[in-house]
Image (spheres, rainbow, N blue to C red):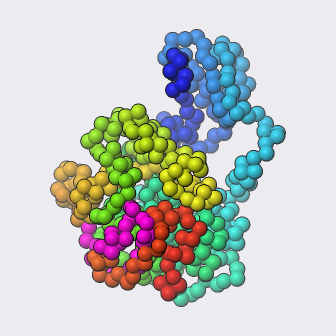
Amino acid sequence: FTLAQEGYDVWLGNFRGSPEASRHKFLNPSEKSFWDFTPDEHGRLDLPALINLVLRASGKDKLVYSGFSMGTHTFFIYCHYHPDACVRNVQAAIMLGPVLDMTFLADSNFLAGAGLLLPSGPYRETVSNDFGFRTQSFDATTDDGYISRLTRIQRKSGVNIHKGKFPILILHGLMSSSLIWTGLGPHSAYAFMLAEKGYDVWLGNFRGSPEASRHTFLNPSEKPFWDFTPDEHGKHDLPALINAVLYHSGKAKLVYSGYSLGTQSFFIYCHYHPEACRKKVQAAIMMAPVMDMSFLTDEKFLAIARFLQPTGAYRKELDAKRVFRFPTPEAISSSLPPDANALLKVFTLHPPALETLAAHGIAPQEVIERVWPGYAIPWALSTYDFYTQLLTTKRFQALDWGPRKNLQRYGSLIPTLYDVKKTNVPVYLVAGSADKTATVLDSEKIRLSLPEAKRLLAVPGFTHTDFVFSDDAPNNKMNKEELQ
């Protein structure tokens, strides 16, 4: 904007692999072949295409190139492969944070990250092994083709897996993934705490998270992949995940533990599959439980719901941009209030600036960089439509797509109304007294609605994000008796 204000013709490019360069004529971004590239391809193939397009569209003979960090590295590679084109097409280059061979790099975080990402294994498997836990990964395929990664975490030594205990399946919340359950490290992370006590821990992922972004035939870079709501999480995702856990663990039942969206999706699962729920789930532990959100007072959540109204001008702008996930950098718009854009920036930076997080009440700061990779992940816009409808109607029902699509999806002209009384297993509820999203009042309403609610524990001072970011979270979520 500073350059455009000065009268320059500004062009913003994207390297392959970024959200705005995640399409291909025939490769699928959910498959490994799409991601077989390095900065070599950025310089040899991407930059020529971008530079030629700018010159052709602008009608100019030359341009000025400005790159940051890898964008400088890549320009040097471009000039190596295309020296004549570089001289002919580029007037000058402005290099910000330039990178060549990084001989004098001293960033310990960068070095540590490089060590974790050695080709010897995925990030979490490396972390788990370093902390003394055994990790296994499995794929669970839903009946409508989504492929979700399941991660199993067990103690390597010192504590035996208790044969009398049930495996525990843990599901995340909105804009999130299973990574949130390991980011706090071996002493505070929910998954490691349970594994340390000898439990067989399974971390599941809902469709749309990075670890559930594959499909047997749909392309994640296209809209049909993202046409889902919590209805699909409960109807399709949870049956596949639960069946996979029971199959691989050899057990007949499991304990389910969900957070926020993960609780709501469980109620939906029980609505559609009450017999399977009774047969396969021993008990459910609900953290920051959500049903119809009658008593929600979170102004940020309400603001997002307001400006994402399906009929609003901002939503039409997103539709015109072919944006079907939220939040992404494209969601930042001059049509939004400054404070709304400020909030969006928090959720589109990975990791975000610590001072920005602090300004929005997310703490403690020392754990942000470890937990954030599994948090603030762009989610399907249709899911936000589900929540906007929920806040408007106060009815716990499926998204109303209109009579025609309702008939296709639900077999009825009107959306499905969920019956929480079909949740026919013992349920333990854990709420935060300072949670404005999943309030204690809402948790009490849920408790009174469930046929087998056992207990509601209100944790003093806990906010919605404390279940993810607080080092004290595991100790407050549940006690030993409830896990037995």
At horizontal 57% and vertical 36% (from top left) the residue drawn is: 16
Q: Is residue 258 left or right of residue 100?
A: left
Residue placed most toward the observer, 469 or 248: 469
Location of residue 31 in the rendering, given as x and y in whole percent from the top left corner: 54, 48
Residue at 43% in and 39% down: 338
229, 68: nearer the viewer: 68
Q: Nearer the viewer, residue 337 or 79?
A: 337
Q: Residue furthest bottom?
A: 164
Q: At x 55% / y 45%, what residue is drawn? A: 349
Whole-percent x, y for residue 263 in the image: 39, 68
Image quadrant in which you'd find residue 191: bottom right
Residue 444 on the magenta segment: yes
Q: Can residue 396 be found in the magenta stretch?
A: no
Residue 363's place in the image compared with 339, above or below, is: below
Find the magenta span and give its range.
418-446
96 in relation to 82, above or below: below
The reply to whether residue 22 is in sight is: no
In the image: residue 390, left or right of residue 380:
left
- Residue 482 at least partly seen: yes
